[in-house]
Image (cartoon, rainbow, N blue to C red):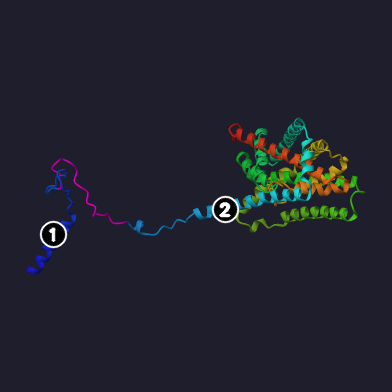
Amino acid sequence: MRLTHAADNAARVSIQSERKPIQAKGPDAPDAPDSRGQNPAGGEPPAYSSRQTPLTREERAPSTQPDTSRPAQRKRSRALLRALLHYGGSVLALALLFRFLPGRQVLHALAKLPALLWIAVLAGYLATHLLGVTKYRLMLNTTGAGLTYFQAARCYFAGLFGSLFLPSLIGGDLVRVTLAMRYGKTRAGVLLASFVDRTIDFAALVLLAATGALLAPSALEPETRRVFLWIGLAAIAGLAIVALLAVLIPFRRLSFRMRRRAVSLRRAGRSMIEKPRAALTALGIALASQLSFITLSIVLAEACGLRLLFRAWLFAWPIAKLSAAIPVTQGGIGVREAALAGLLVPFGAPPTLTVAAGLAWEAVVISGALLAGAFALGARRTARPA
């Protein structure tokens, strides 16, 4: 019993010694607390560093929340890598052009271009895009999106600006659709209208190229004409397959969410089918816009010293623009100039002058896209969603 009592006393003494605060030595040391735990000087009792609160069950359990920082970093790195590849592709394409062509002659042809004429072509380029805004709004409101002209203009010019930083010409359509969904009453209508609008643009380019090929058959070889014929037939067959799949898809077997989206798309499609004049009007506007772009390009080319028949441009220019839709370079820079130079060779065009005219037009496109981005940024407060 005495041993047990002595052990208890020893344990109490050790616990009290551990809880006893360490007092500083010297004349400035604070007074020790009394038996009630209060400081004689009137201060608060000292906090003992050895005392710790126990952890709760939630704190002891490991965190089950997923780490979203790594996927975000991967997406950023992939986007950066894609941008570098596309910009690198444009630089490589231009470097190859200047490698196989005399660069001094290209720069000399560009030096002939008057600055005021280039500014006038830039103004005409932006004015032609106003026709594109009208066409885009017509397609949107045909499906029931209900956008004002100012809202449609902001979406359109934002997409034009986005084409500078996204691959090919289709990259800007993603920006345009994303912004239009904020203003539109139906997202399905915005998606369908944007798809039909871009399809009409491609159809207008194909029609112009086919017309140019028919007007200048002597400059094209029989094999080339056959290639264009097969391309046209393949495009028609593709559209027929898409229409057939849209009719034969068993929507009842789809999930409720997919059926809901399909119903929205079907309603938007029916509203567009009920207004065939809108599609024909949009096709007419697209043809007028592309002809205006071709005319402006001819003005720049003649200022650089390149003079060709209109039918040659009518054939080569639309195909060169379609080649820019290939997601190899940034905004089709470099690919469009190379394609235009190759297509105009059968018509007797020197490649140096063709590349010079193409670079002058590329400067117009880039400057117009920058001005379009400034407009889209400045109109964000005015064109608010209803």
- Give how far apart the Cα atoms at labels 1 and 2 are: 63 Å
Q: Position of residue 205 (x, y in %)?
A: 80, 45
Nearer-the-camera pick, 232 or 13: 13
User: In the picture, which quadrant includes the N terminus?
Assistant: bottom left
Please give left or right for residue 376 compared with residue 365 in the image: left
Question: Tag 1, which secondary structure?
Answer: helix
Residue denoted by label 1: 13
| Res 319 visible | no
* Residues shaded magenta: 37-55
The residue sitting at the top extreme is 116
| Res 310 visible | yes
**Mark 2: which amino acid?**
Ser
Please give left or right for residue 200 compared with residue 185 in the image: right
Q: Quadrant of residue 63?
A: bottom left
Mark 2, other Cα within 10 Å: few <14 / some 14–19 / many ≥20:
few
Please give left or right for residue 55 compared with residue 210 in the image: left
Please give left or right for residue 241 compared with residue 257 in the image: right
User: In the picture, which quadrant includes the C terminus?
Assistant: top right
Residue denoted by label 2: 77
Residue drawn 57% across and 53% down?
A: 77
Mark 1, other Cα within 10 Å: few <14 / some 14–19 / many ≥20:
few
Identify the mark nearer the N-term, 1 or 2.
Answer: 1
Nearer-the-camera pick, 282 or 323: 323
Nearer-the-camera pick, 220 or 225: 220
